[in-house]
Amino acid sequence: MPAAAVTCIDLDYLGLPGAAVAFLVEIPDHEIAHRILVECGPEACRPKLESELARLGIEPDLIDAVALTHIHLDHAGAAGGFAARGARVLVHPRGVRHLVDPAKLVASSRRVHGGRFDRHYGEPIACPAERVESVEHGEVARFGQATFRAVETPGHAKHHHAWLLEHAGGRECFTGDVAAMLVPGTDFISVPAPATDFDPLAWDRSLAELERLGPDRLWLTHGGRIDEAAEFLARARQRVAEEAQILFEVAREPSDESAIERYRGWLHPRAEAAGVPEPMRHAFLGRAFMEMNLAGVRKLLKDRAEGKADAPRG
Ligand SMILES: [Zn+2]
């Protein structure tokens, strides 16, 4: 049985090359091929995704399934457009209702992103309920001889799965945001810690689980293909731990302004030393990114104070 093929499709997300991709997985099966998208980007990028698929000779109605790592709009916003043309949508149980009725997700995203919402995300189309499949941790979707296994991986989001594709060519892990992100064109790992779900202890356990599974390759939604999977997972664990540490420190600053300045003073020199040029620091690690992470750690501290999130032991 021939191996599956994975193609990274750049989405021009935020108008920036390399900012986010969708993965086309083609699985040969006798005379036919199964075609699965892992992630589909925001609705605003669906024209770009569909035109790239068309260049590969694939009309949208040939997509059998869309496997989502989580329902944040930069990963899942375009799912309804494919579901409307017959694709199954595989998602974490907590994500189902937001795909069927995106109104709440849209309202909160509009609050966070304001005027940028329409340009960057676009209003998702609701998925027909009968197309959405709730997939629990450990469940497997089979396509010919290949399988996709859901691996529950909270930390960035509570409703997060990584997908482990096992096929004749090896074991691929589609990590969503659990292996964090790369600033495009560099080797610098940035850690997205949004409210309401950021949880560094859960995140570390998730990465330890991926290390245990030992995939051959990683595929990052914000970063693409990674061949040195074990080395990268170890680095991602370290980056999540140190980012959490600095966020806990800056959250104690008396004002948002001083918190952001202190965070910038820690983050940007590290990125610069790792070869991230100023325009890329501005675009990917700028004020919006730092405000998101500060909100994430504040929400975590509030949840811990209220006993809703694990606190470190000892
Ligand atoms: Zn993301």
Image (spheres, rainbow, N blue to C red):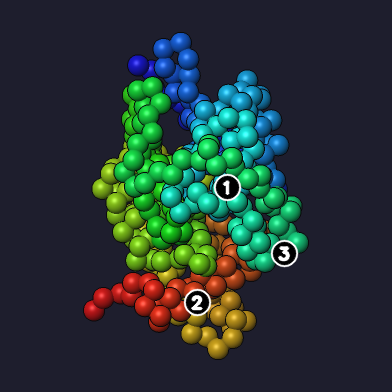
Number of residues whose C-alpha sits closer than 10 Å to that of mark 2, classed few (under 14), some (14–19) or many (20 or more): some
Q: Name the residue under label 2.
A: 298
- Hey, what amino acid is under mark 3? Gly
Q: Are marks 3 and 2 in contact (CB under 8 Å)?
A: no
| Left or right, residue 258 beside residue 224 | right
Per the image, label 3 sits on a secondary structure element best described as loop
Q: In this view, does 288 lie to the left or right of 214?
A: right
Q: Locate the C terminus and report the quarter of the image it occupies.
A: bottom left
113 vs 209: above or below: below
Residue 172 can be seen in this image: yes
Mark 3, Cα crowd under 10 Å, few <14 / some 14-19 / many 20+, is few
Query: How far apart are labels 1 and 2 at the CA level?
Result: 30 Å
Residue at position x 74%, y 52% from top? 119
Please provide percent x and percent y for residue 235.
Answer: 37, 55
First along the sequence among labels 1 and 2? 1
Depth check: give the residue in front, 152 or 203.
152
**Residue for point 47% across, 23% down:** 34
Q: Is residue 22 left or right of residue 49?
A: left
Q: Which residue lies furthest to the left in this view?
A: 314
Residue shown at 46% from the left, 59% from the top: 157
SS at circle 1: helix
Q: Can residue 16 be seen in this view?
A: no
